[in-house]
Every structure is written in structure tokens, then in C-alpha cells.
Amino acid sequence: MSHEHQPISPITDWKGQHFVSVDQITDKKQIFDLFKRAEIMKQTVENKNIHETLRGMSVVILFYQPSTRTFSSFEAASRRMGAYTYAYNGMNEISSAVKGETLPDTIRSIYQTTAADVIILRHPDDSSSAIAAEASYVPIVNAGSGKSEHPTQALLDLYSLYQTQGHLEGLKVAMVGDLLYGRTIKSLAKLLALVDPNVELHFISPNEVKAPREFVAELSTRCAVSESTDLKKVLPKVDAVYMTRVQEEWFKKANKMDEYERIKNKYVLTRHMVNQMKPSATVMHPLPRNGEIMEEVDEDPRAYYFEQMRAGLYIRMALLDAILANR
Amino acid sequence: MSHEHQPISPITDWKGQHFVSVDQITDKKQIFDLFKRAEIMKQTVENKNIHETLRGMSVVILFYQPSTRTFSSFEAASRRMGAYTYAYNGMNEISSAVKGETLPDTIRSIYQTTAADVIILRHPDDSSSAIAAEASYVPIVNAGSGKSEHPTQALLDLYSLYQTQGHLEGLKVAMVGDLLYGRTIKSLAKLLALVDPNVELHFISPNEVKAPREFVAELSTRCAVSESTDLKKVLPKVDAVYMTRVQEEWFKKANKMDEYERIKNKYVLTRHMVNQMKPSATVMHPLPRNGEIMEEVDEDPRAYYFEQMRAGLYIRMALLDAILANR
Amino acid sequence: MSHEHQPISPITDWKGQHFVSVDQITDKKQIFDLFKRAEIMKQTVENKNIHETLRGMSVVILFYQPSTRTFSSFEAASRRMGAYTYAYNGMNEISSAVKGETLPDTIRSIYQTTAADVIILRHPDDSSSAIAAEASYVPIVNAGSGKSEHPTQALLDLYSLYQTQGHLEGLKVAMVGDLLYGRTIKSLAKLLALVDPNVELHFISPNEVKAPREFVAELSTRCAVSESTDLKKVLPKVDAVYMTRVQEEWFKKANKMDEYERIKNKYVLTRHMVNQMKPSATVMHPLPRNGEIMEEVDEDPRAYYFEQMRAGLYIRMALLDAILANR
């Protein structure tokens, strides 16, 4: 048995690479390469064209944490590209039958049984994707590893801003909610700072769940960052507001449910509040929402949280194309 | 965000419509449109032809109640038409991870993540399909909503009669079993009355689970209806007998398990009984059976309950074709 | 209803046949027919060619015992051949909703709903595949029935030996582990003896789980068989070693967990031990492993247990081709 292992390293070309962490993106050229591909995907999906550049390739989707949204997004991306698609949503239950098998053994096994060309992995352990990448003979795409990384979410969020604002230069973005445990916003913040040092990020959170000090310190060396508890004051001046859910599970683990109850409904976006925003503003949310945005906002033209998921389809098609297609 | 919602209304053309209730069918022309399409599907499946008129389209199958039969039937219909097919059988478990998300949010999300062209929904709540249709930007097909509706079952039952008898005019049909809780028979009865006022329906049930009074009264204004507890007397004169299972779950909920035990085996179709029927008669059952038809009947040429499910494949292919295909 | 049932009988031609037991293979010509087809599959997969000889056909995969490896292998085999593929991994849970339905009714139902051309079944009952074959109108492939049979595993094991050794004549093979409960090794032993009476089989096991007496007696009339507890002595002279896991579940059922603890780690293959083997030797294991082969062995060129699963893909493609394709 002799195979080349691909290292996890900064991405200078998507082709054949693992995508485990948003930190691998150190050159904004790689981002715009994906965006260009995503535009093509958008055209083909909207026109119901067949664009199966992965015909003959195999994509395995292994989810150890059940999911509707990310799972179906990757499955759709893979099938629409024409790949043979093997999508397993209940690996946590199935693999309990295979007690004691290590993740490296599972990764190598599924590669062999399916002749996979890429493996997309969601797993509760923070280090799962890195471990899988170390063991794998084919690229690993991280579809969510514990509470640490969900890099394709960051890309689709960035692409959503690009789609709605037409550019990413100098954008002012309010990021709202649980900035301590939430991974979504931190990854997006990093990518925005990479793309343009002139962006302005406004972190709005209850004091109990402010962004980690070292994260804010580091980010502040790369772009303008403000912190506050006052959402209303910030709304009129930003180009986008990114609402997030306070995630009950972290508070439960930390035995801080009273804190959760106190802060979970601190920020609720209403139609009245959206009306204070610029007409061209974008309202985002990674979904599912849990009351953070009232349903009365849904019909506002600034509401983009459902379309945001469509951006996920295009970005994931683009990513598979960039990693696998012979072009 | 701005989309056209399609109303739930009488179907004058299947194209682009929701199909939530059998009550939307008010014109028998729409039924025969489907039957004509189903004949084509039958030919292509039997000849193993490729007939993928939905290539490039996407079909989502969302089941909140696990199912083998209806689920695999819709999945097969979708795949055989060449559609990108996303089939989720365990939504009740997966979505428990997404506590608190509303059905409208889930419907809009899955539409966006997959670029769905139609969503097929099975859900335990009676109003689920109507709620989904209200929220959805693409047609909703009801694959079973609580105890109220399962409209594609009614169509496949009707098509089975059409296939075996060659026509639907003046048919005499015995409908047997739990007519109080059972939804299958009531929907079929409505469609038969719509197609031809000269049909004769014979309702055979234990007194405890007779068809609701208002239902019988209304139906009697549209065709001949008789009620009785005596199956044997009716068998020799009918063209078809439709056996159904007494469903334990309703009796359990109503705390009437002693009643269930008393009536569950009241009607059991034997070979001897089938031999009293016309040689051209049709024996139907929606399956699974629970002793209502003895296995000795399976080899009788009048037994049609397994083929009945094949009729389901053809009708569901026809329905997807009618709603989606560009013709 | 009138269909031809295919008998379970010795296979003289794969076309249209059930494959329920390894005992159906009584002529080695049938084995080499599959191997020849498997070579073609290997070429097409390795070259990423499209080779969809089952286009228009339908394959149903019904697993009543959840599985990653065998399930994904069959799913990949079916999809790569271009068949419409309906793969259900959780039948044990789904079908609990269909209480009381018999396996014959389920088999006939799924055939009708999907227009299946073959049904691949894994089920905990020893007689499940034979019962299904009796009821089915289309070929049944046994993907594991209780503790009795897993015939495609035996074929892929044999093909692995053929691939690595270049031939099967006169091979010396050590078979190690639980030879009492384990089914894998017994099936492979039978096939090796069929292919060439000059093979030498070395059974290595703890005394508590030696191969059944009658099995050894019968096999000894067909090829050379030795029994021993000493793995190290045998290793230098064999062409292949087949390690297996001692399966906890049988000991649990038999209330012999102390025995399990005593013998489970009796044979552990180390790098040092592999280095005593011929340079051309093959190290096999059906996986998952539970410590029987140390990870340090993985990079040795003799380690073949991961590639062994790839052989499973090729053999299952070959089998579907042989049973279904019009050639």
C-alpha cells in the first residue's frame, strides 16, 4: 500500500486539496476563483441546464451529526455536477455497530468500497477533519467539525455578501449574537478582513458571550473592529447585518441554562428595525432561526437568509468543481 | 424576496400546481389526463426504456413518518423520470436536531439548498401539506398528511380499477373494513362518484367503525351507496372488493383496544370467498395486510394487491410529469 | 398473478439467478467468469470510464442490519453500472412501523413499487435470503443472512488472493481467529478447495473456537487442512494470512464473556511477524479490525486489507453485470 498524502496547507490551487479550515485561505485570489465558478453554477441551475463536469467521479458524504440543510446542500451540489453520490446522514448510529473502528480506518474503508474521489465529513470532534485528512488518499472537505470549523459556511456567507452588495470592498457589517461559542461569524470575519483591510466589523453581543479577547485583538490588526451591546444604534450605518442563534447546547454543557434564558432573546430583528437600515442592506442568518428574526421581516427585499442557502449550493458546486474537475 | 405562491384550488391543469387534497379534483378530465400519461409510463417501464423527461429538474422527498412503500414508490418515480432526487425518510429524527424550526422555514430552506422543483411531503399533522403549500415557492405533493389525506393513493386505487376492469363506468365496488378512521376508501369513493354517477358503492364494516353519517349522506347525493355488515352477500355481485386493515393506532389513541380486538378480524378474505366472485373481479388492498386477506388468495388471478402498488409507480411518474414536464 | 419463481440451485449461468449461498457455486468456471468481468470493472473504475451496462435497470438494496462497508460497496456497484438505485439501510427501524408484515410481502411490495430487477438483502435471520428468494419474482442477492452466509464476501476474498498472487493454484493460506462462529473463513475455504484440490489451508485458532469437527472432516476430503494454535510457526511458509476478529456478539449471546476476554487478543499481527512472511505474501482481514492487526503493518506492501474492499466493489459490479446485463 503506497499512497501520497496531501498536506493541510495554505491553498494555492484548489485542485486535489483538502479543505479543512478557513485558515487555509491566505490568498484572496482563491476566493474569487471560487466565486467565478459559482457564477457559472448559478447560471446553469437557474436555466436548468445540465452541467455535469464530475461525470464518472465519486463523492462520499459522511455525516456523524444529522443535518438537513448542509447535508442536502452537499448532496445537491454533488448530484448536479453528475458525480456518483453516496450520502450517509446517520453515521453516528450506523457506525455504533462498528464499535471500536477508528476514524482513519473508516475513511480508508469508505474510500475503497466506493472508489471515492472526495470525502465530505461532518463530525462532532474538533480535530476530526484534520485526522481524516491525515489518513485519506483523496481530498477531505470539512462540512462541520465540532464547534471549531465549518469553512464552507464561511464561503457561502461571503459569497452572499458579494452577490447582494456587488463587491466586498469597504463593507460595514454588523455581526450579532453569541460571539463566544458561535463559529460562523468568526470565520466570516476572518475572510472579510483578508479580502479587504478597509471593511468595518461591528460585533454586537451580550456581555456574557462576547468574542474571545485574543480573537478580537488579532482581528483588529487586520481591519476595523468595534464591539457593543447596542444593535439599534449600528443598524442604520451598516451594509449588512448577520444575525445568529444563541446555541442552547453550549450553555447546557456548561451548566449555565439560566444565563441562556437571560440572553437568548436579547436581539430580535423586527420589521421596524429593518426599516432603519439602508435600502440596499442585506439581512443574513445561517438558519435555523429561533426567534432572532421575526417572520414579518421575511417579505422585506433586504431579507436574504433563505437565498443565502442557495448561495451555499452554488459555492459547494464551485468547490467540488475546483477540487475535482479536469480543468 | 418575492415569489408567487400557488393557491390550493381546483385543478384545471396539473402544470405547476400543488396537489394537497383529493378534493382539488373536480373535473374527471384531469384524471384521464393522468391515466393517459400513466399508460406511457407503464410501457416505458415494462420495456425498460429510458424516459427521463425531468432531466435537470430536482425532486425533494421529505418524510416525517418513515415508510417503505410510498417512499420507495415516489423515489422510483422521480429517479426513473431522470430528476435529481433527494429522498429523506427520517425527517422526524433529523429535524429533532433542529428544534423549534417551523415547517414553513424547513420547506423554504430545503427548496433553497437543493433548488427543488417540487417537494413531496409526508407528515403526521393533518394540515401539514396545506401549510407547506402556503409557504412554498414550488409545488407541494401530499404523500400522506396525518389521518386526513393521501391523495396519490386514491389515484393509484382508481387507476388499478381502470387497469383491471378496462373502464370505470357503472362499476360495483365493495369497500370493506374500518370506514370510520380509514382515509383510503373515502377518497377512492369520492373519485369514483365523480367519474360516473352510475357506480354502486357497497360499504361493509363493523357497526363500531361505520363511515361517518355526513360523509355517507353527501356521497349518496352523487352515486348509489349501500351499507351493511355482511361481506359474503355482496361479493358475488361486485366487480371489485377493496379490503382494508383496521388500524390499531386509532383505537390505541382512543383507548378502545378491547373494541379493536373484537373487530380486527371480522372480515378475512379466503380463497373460498374469492371463488364466489365474478371471474373478472378485482381484489384490492392498500397493504400492508394484517390477516385481512389469506395468503392462499395470492395466486388467484383476481388478486391484484401487489400489482396495485405498481400502478402507484406509474401514477406517480404521471403526476410528476404532469406537474413538471415541459409539454 | 402468475410469475416464474427461480429455484435456488447450483449456478450454471449467473444470468437471472438468485445468489443466496456460496454452496450454489459448484463449478469453478462460474468463478472465473466473474473474475473476468471484475477485471473489466477494475479497468473502467481506475480509468474513471463510464461503463453503465445496467442503464434502465433497477437495483433495490434492503438492509435490516445497518452497515457502512457492505452497504456502500453494493450502492457504489449499482450506481456505477448506471442502474436506478434504491438503497435502504435502516429497514429494521422503518419496517417496525409496518408491524406484522411478512418478509415475503415486503419483498413483493418493494419489487412492485420500484420495478426492481434485483433485490440485495441483508437480514439477521439465517433463512431470510432463502425465504426472500422463494417469494421473489426477481433475483435475490444475499448480502449477509444472520451468521450463516455472506457469499459476496467469500468471492471478494477469493478475488483478492487471485489479484495479489496472480493465480489460485496450490496456494498455502493461514486462516486465523474465531473459526467456530466466523462465517467468512469457512466460505473462503470451501471456494479455495473447489478451485484447486492442491491448496493447503492452515486453520489457526484458540482451542475454544476451533472450526466445527464435521466442517474440517468434510473439507479434508477435498484439500489439505491443518489445525494449530501456533500462528508464528505457520507464517513463514504461507502465501497469505487471513486474520479475523473474534466477534463479541456471539460470546455475549452464549453468556461466555470471560472466554471472549481471554481469547480476543490471542492473535495480533505485528510488523515483526509480517517480516517473517514471504515478500510476495498477502495480509488480509475482512474489517473492521479490533486490534488483530497493528497499525504499524498498514504501510507494509503485503498489507492488502484496505484494497481487499476495493476488490469487493469490482466483484459486486461483476456480479450485477453477470445476473442482469444483456450479454
Image (cartoon, coloured by chain):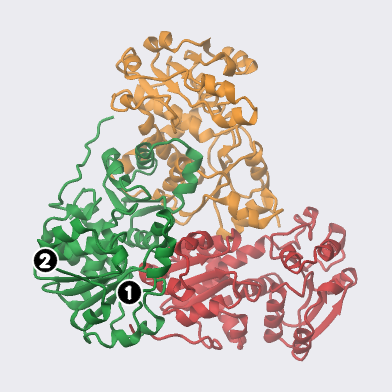
Chain colours: A green, B red, C orange
Q: Is residue C38 above or below residue A206?
A: above
Amino acid type of disc 2? Cys
Q: Hey, which quadrant is residue B327 in on the image?
A: bottom left
**Residue at 59% from the left image edge and 12% from the top image edge:** C221
Instruction: Choose the circle earlier in sequence order: 2 or 1.
Output: 2
Q: Which mark is residue A305?
A: 1
The answer to whether C302 appears left or right of C250 in the picture is left
| Residue named by callout 2 | A223
Residue A34 in sight: no
Quadrant that contains the C terminus of chain A = bottom left
> Of all residues shown, which one is farthest toward the top?
C233
Relative image position of residue A33 (x, y in whole percent): 15, 62
Q: Residues within 10 Å of mark 1 (few under 14, many from 20)?
A: many
Q: Hey, which quadrant is residue C281 in on the image?
A: top left
Number of dots carrying numbers? 2
Relative image position of residue A116 (x, y in whole percent): 33, 46
